[in-house]
Image (spheres, grey):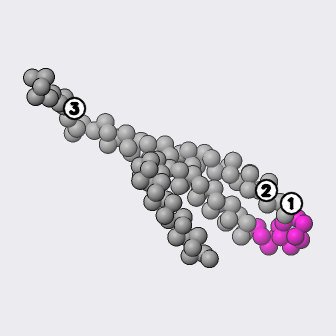
Amino acid sequence: MTYAVLYITSIVCIWWIYRVGWQEALKKILSVLIPSALIILFNVKAGRLLFRSPVVGIISILPTAIFIYRGSLPLVAGINSWIDRKTNDFVESQETIDAEVISKEDA
């Protein structure tokens, strides 16, 4: 079942890259993966304490997920702005030449 989920996820990521471009897709994928990974890591580390009682675990999952998601937004925004800066540095490079194309009909 895990392989099926990973396969479907990879197909969706490839389709998303084709649809919007690799930079926008990378930013969206990272904005989903970073908070998810932090939530999973927190639940693994704090699981021994929080999930001794199932009631405490169920009550604490949603608030901790929201708190970690909100806390990871500056990190995600920083990574996205870094990706944008690298893209803009390439576009605004001194080595690029702007040229106008004139068709034969207009000449």
Q: Which residues are magenta?
A: 46-57
Q: Secondary structure at mark 2?
A: helix
Distance from disc 3 to disc 1, alpha carbons, whole Å, reads 59 Å
Report if residue 30 is visible in the image: yes
Question: Which residue is drawn at the image coordinates 21% and 39% (left, top)?
Answer: 95
Distance from disc 1 to disc 2, alpha carbons, whole Å, reads 7 Å
Determine contact: label 3, label 1, CB under 8 Å: no
Residue type, label 3 = Asp
Determine contact: label 1, label 2, CB under 8 Å: yes
Q: Residue furthest front?
A: 105
Q: Is residue 72 above or below residue 40?
A: above
Q: Is residue 97 above or below residue 70?
A: above
Question: Which residue is drawn at the image coordinates 68% and 65% (left, top)?
Answer: 40
Badge 1 density bin: few <14, some 14–19, many ≥20, Cα 10 Å:
few
Q: Which mark is residue 62?
A: 2
Q: Secondary structure at mark 3?
A: loop
Q: Is residue 47 magenta?
A: yes
Residue type, label 1 = Ile
Q: Which residue is mark 3?
A: 98
First-in-chain label (2 vs 3):
2
